[in-house]
Image (cartoon, helix red, strand yellow):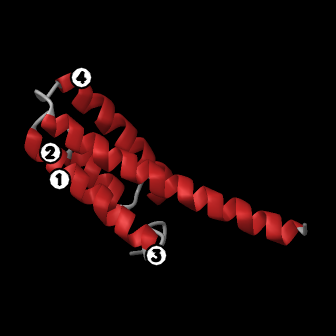
Amino acid sequence: MSATKRLGEAEGEFEMLLEKRIDDLIKAGWRVLASDFSEVAFEEWRKQALSCLTCLCGAEHAYTEYFRIKILKADPSNVLTGVGVLTAVNMQHRQGTSCTLDH
């Protein structure tokens, strides 16, 4: 197998992992809402989601900054907002538009 083909396969696997990670965080946000709204669960979800956004989009991207600024207080409306941001990143990613670009 050529190095180019192996690299292409690795990139494909990485893309699938990114999609799964975003999907898992969106589902986790819904689980936080469906539970008795544990502040501990909210904080853990918030930290993981912010870390993922920072990795995917960069620390200064609008999605990351919005999430960091707006999703601070453990409140159900903030979870809805955060799930919306993650969904937007997910949709862009699935359409082949990386959020690391100036979008």
Residue 23: which disc?
none
Residue at image x 15%, y 50%?
80
Picture mark count: 4
Q: What residue type is labelled 4?
A: Val
Q: Name the residue under label 4.
A: 40
Secondary-structure class at tag 2: helix
Asked whether disc 4 touches disc 1, contact meaning CB atoms under 8 Å apart, the reply is no
Q: Quadrant of residue 94?
A: bottom left
Could you tell me residue 49's position as x and y percent? Answer: 36, 44
Q: Is residue 22 above or below residue 87?
A: above
Report if the CB atoms under discs 2 and 1 are less than 8 Å apart. yes
Say which element carries label 1: helix
**Relative to the observer, which residue lies in front, 7 or 102?**
7
| Amino acid type, residue under disc 1 in the picture | Thr
Q: Residue at x 31, y 53 (%)?
A: 65
Q: Residue 78 carries which label?
A: 2
Give the spatial CA distance, label 3 vs label 4.
33 Å
Q: Residues within 10 Å of mark 4 (few under 14, many from 20)?
A: few
The answer to whether residue 22 is left or right of residue 73 is right
Q: Quadrant of the C terminus?
A: bottom left
Between discs 3 and 1, the one toward the N terminus = 1
Residue corresponding to mark 3:
97
Q: What element carries label 4?
A: helix
Q: Earlier in the sequence, mark 3 or mark 4?
A: 4
Name the residue that disc number 1 marks: 81
Q: Badge 3, how many Cα within 10 Å: few under 14, some, many 20+?
A: few
Give the distance between the C-alpha atoms of the residues marked 2 and 4, in whole angstroms. 14 Å
Above or below, 92 against 86 in this view is: below
